[in-house]
Amino acid sequence: MRNYDTKRQHDKGKLHAMERIEALLDEGSFREVGTGITNIDTQLGLKGGTLPYDGVITGYGTIDGRRVCIYSQDFTVAGGTLGHNHGQKIASIINMAVEYRCPLIGINDSGGARIQEGVASLASYGDIFFANTAASGCVPQISIIAGPCAGGAVYSPGITDFIFMVNDIGNMFVTGPKVIKQVTNETVSTEDLGGAKVHGTVSGVSHFTCPTEQDCYARVRRLLSYIPHSAGEKPDTPPAYIDQEALNVNFLVPKDPNKAYDVKVVIDAVFDEGSFLEIQEDFAKNIVIGFAKLSGMTVGIIANQPTCKAGVLDCDSSDKAARFIRFCDCYDIPIVTLADVPGFFPGSDQERKGIIRHGAKLLYAYSEATTRKLTVIMRKAYGGAYIAMCSRHLRADYVYAWPTAQMAVMGGDGAIDILYGKQMKTMSDEEKAAFIAEKREEYNTLYMNADIGLANGYVDDILKPSETRKRLFEDLVMLSGKTNTCASYKKHGNIPL
């Protein structure tokens, strides 16, 4: 048993690399790989064979009895810097995860590339990035940022599926505060530049922000209990349906299309109570994504959030949802979409940020996904956003509408202004108000009710909200044997990144 320098880490409020592995894995399950590998000689005074395990502990173990591969960088060994052999150990354990068909977990705590090893260090970064890319879609990859992660090192977590960041000790940035000060004369703290809060709320780089390391490892274990551990993993036999006495979902969504409500309350009522595991909770809050259980079956949920920007789609929310769709499709996790969307966000700011390109990602991701796709239009679905939220036209397997659902090019008031704007210019205020009320009722009757979608085959059924849970369950069971029958000669499509 090695003697690890735990005190140096504890003094910084951090666990040691080995303590982190033990906190995450089942007790006594870890088996180390590459124990005798050390560093190479350099021309800058670093003698080969002096750094134990070259600063990274790699191996495999179990979480809840299921195998995972793992690496943990040791900041007490040369600052956890990545040299050639250090990088090769990480690339090797990623490849091993693919061979073993189990998730890969990386715990990052490193000062970056080892300067003494020059391009040999950079070469290993390239090998890691290639291994991450090759593993993507084969096995889930999880990154934990429990210390510094800077420069080229950030791109390995950036390729992985989920990033967990620990408050106060974890940070990520391509260029550090000192270099930024030197080049641009901008003064910025490490935390403001790349701390957990920034990446959890502004950049959207991370998926989970954790107050402590122990909380982080508990969340990783919970996430792994929801998702398949490799592509092609056969799901368990569908369980029996379990009814749920919860909040009466019939009254959770206001009839007034302009009144806000919290879609998470609806999720909790329709799916197994307390099962919702939200992802990127504080980023692009106008859309909600995450995993939940439906009578014990895992589903991916994408839902507009009326409490934030009325649930409108914009650049960030489109990216957030599209990335999640692609993960679910990789591992054949069913996707349930809860739509209540007034459209894409208007304005010059969004146009300049590329809402066309970002919105196209969402359309592309839904269209390409061949996993089971179920959609519920809860209240409104207008314009291009109606299509984008997994409509029948993007090959949803089933689309349902609640009785108050409205589907149209735009809301009534906007349509009336365009259709009758010139005519209303000559009216008095009193005449105009009466005219708008009359035309609004006419427009809603002719163009916006769910019966029109039903008659055209765009909606499969109009459900009471209280009927939704059981119908979704029955559909998921019926579609459990769904396969992709599309024969294609193309290598792959070109998603608008």
Image: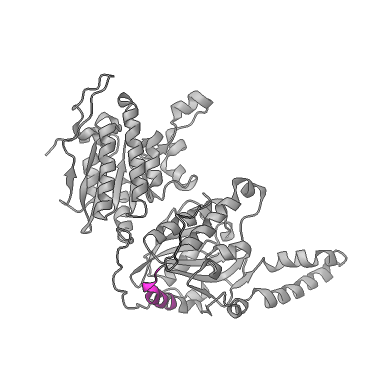
Main SS of residues in magenta:
helix
| Horizontal and vertical percent position of residue 42 | 26, 22
Please count the marks in the image: 0
The front one of 411 and 375 is 375
- For image coordinates 70% across by 69% down, the residue present is 412
Can you give x and y, in whole percent of width and height, for residue 165 in the image? Answer: 37, 45
Can residue 94 be found in the magenta stretch? no
Q: Does the stretch in magenta take in 474?
A: yes
Vertical position of residue 363 compared to residue 216: above or below: below
First to last magenta residue range = 471-483
Q: Quadrant of residue 3?
A: top left
Q: Where, by quadrant of the figure, is residue 90 drawn?
A: top left
Q: Residue at x 45, y 26 (%)?
A: 179
Which residue: 36% across, 43% down? 130
In the picture shown, does residue 139 fall above or below 144? below
Task: Locate residue 445 relative to residue 169 in the image: left or right.
Answer: right
**Spot occupied by residue 394 in the image (x, y as percentages of width and height):** 53, 66
Asked if residue 348 shows in the view, the reply is yes
Q: Which one is in front, 32 or 361?
A: 361
Identify the coloring.
one colour
- Most extreme residue toward the right is 426
Task: Give coordinates of residue 298: x percent, y percent.
Answer: 36, 66
Please identify the quadrant where the N terminus is shown.
Answer: top left
